[in-house]
């Protein structure tokens, strides 16, 4: 009898995890395609094949689902970026532009909505910090030794590689991916080797 109960509890726990993962996957897909305000709990539920109440039972709110989706996106981004290539600014730019081609539009949408996203705003702060640390690691040998000069060069490299720079070039000016990479690389090199 005890083994049957343990099995039943294990199956239920697996079902809870599976349902939560399905809801999160549906949310990721919707948030990657639409602005935060345009995604509804009902839409997430429908996409996941569950009820609206099931989504609320697992996440309590749309913001809760969005936080779970943001964690999945962050893990995918970290995996896509990997260890930063060091000593090769062109490789760094290539990695970032490839990432932005995949999720840049969604990133821009989330950043534009940041003021209304509550606890998601803190997530965006963590993402900015992670990007800064990744760049500092990638450009460690190119950055000045002086603390103040290093910070300025790092922030200039950040501005050059920010998703908004990619958006400006790719979406607003209609540059090709290759042209966008060249312009961003030019900006990065200027940031790292100021006159």
Image (cartoon, grey):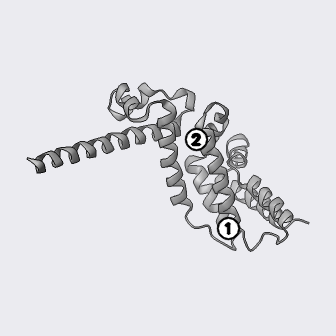
**Residue under the point 67% across and 33% down:** 115
Check if mark 2's residue and mark 1's residue have beta carbons within 8 Å: no
Pointer 1: what residue?
A: 138
Q: Position of residue 78 (x, y in %)?
A: 54, 58
**Number of numbered discs on residues:** 2
| Front-lying residue, 20 or 156 | 20
- Return the residue found at the far front: 2
- Depth order, front residue of 152/104: 152
Residue farthest to the right, as pictured: 195
The answer to whether 94 is drawn above or below residue 53 in the figure is below
User: Which mark, residue 75?
Assistant: none
Residue at the image position 14 percent from the left and 45 percent from the top: 5
Q: Tell which tag, 2 or 1, sits nearer the viewer.
A: 1
Q: CA distance from mark 2 to mark 1?
A: 24 Å
Residue 174, position as x, y percentages in the image: 70, 44
Q: Is residue 174 left or right of residue 4?
A: right
| Of pointers 2 and 1, the one earlier in the residue sequence | 2
Residue pictured at 83% horizontal, 66% vertical: 147
**Residue 172 position in % (x across, y down):** 72, 40
The 10 Å Cα crowd at callout 2, few under 14, some 14 to 19, many 20 or more, is some
Note whether 55 is above or below 177 in the view shown: above
State which quarter of the image contains the C terminus: bottom right
The structure residue drawn at horizontal position 62% and vertical position 67%, both measured from the top left corner, is: 84
Image check: 6 left or right of 98?
Answer: left
Q: Residue 7: percent from the left, percent from the top?
A: 16, 48
SS class, disc 2: helix
Residue assigned mark 2: 106
């Amino acid at each position: 009898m005890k083994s049957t109960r343990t099995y039943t509890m294990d199956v239920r726990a697996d079902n809870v995890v599976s349902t939560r993962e399905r809801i999160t996957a549906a949310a990721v897909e919707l948030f990657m395609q639409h602005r935060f305000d345009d995604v509804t709990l009902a839409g997430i539920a429908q996409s996941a094949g569950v009820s609206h109440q099931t989504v609320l039972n697992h996440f309590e709110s749309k913001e809760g689902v969005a936080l779970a989706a943001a964690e999945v996106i962050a893990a995918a981004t970290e995996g896509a970026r990997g260890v930063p290539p060091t000593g090769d600014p062109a490789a760094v730019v290539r990695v970032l532009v490839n990432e932005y081609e995949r999720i840049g539009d969604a990133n821009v949408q989330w950043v534009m909505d940041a003021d209304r996203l509550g606890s998601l705003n803190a997530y965006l702060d963590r993402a900015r910090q992670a990007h800064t640390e990744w760049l500092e690691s990638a450009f460690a040998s190119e950055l000045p030794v002086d603390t103040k000069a290093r910070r300025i060069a790092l922030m200039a490299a950040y501005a050059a590689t920010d998703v908004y720079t990619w958006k400006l070039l790719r979406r607003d000016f209609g540059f090709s991916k290759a042209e966008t990479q060249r312009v961003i690389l030019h900006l990065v090199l200027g940031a790292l080797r100021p006159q």
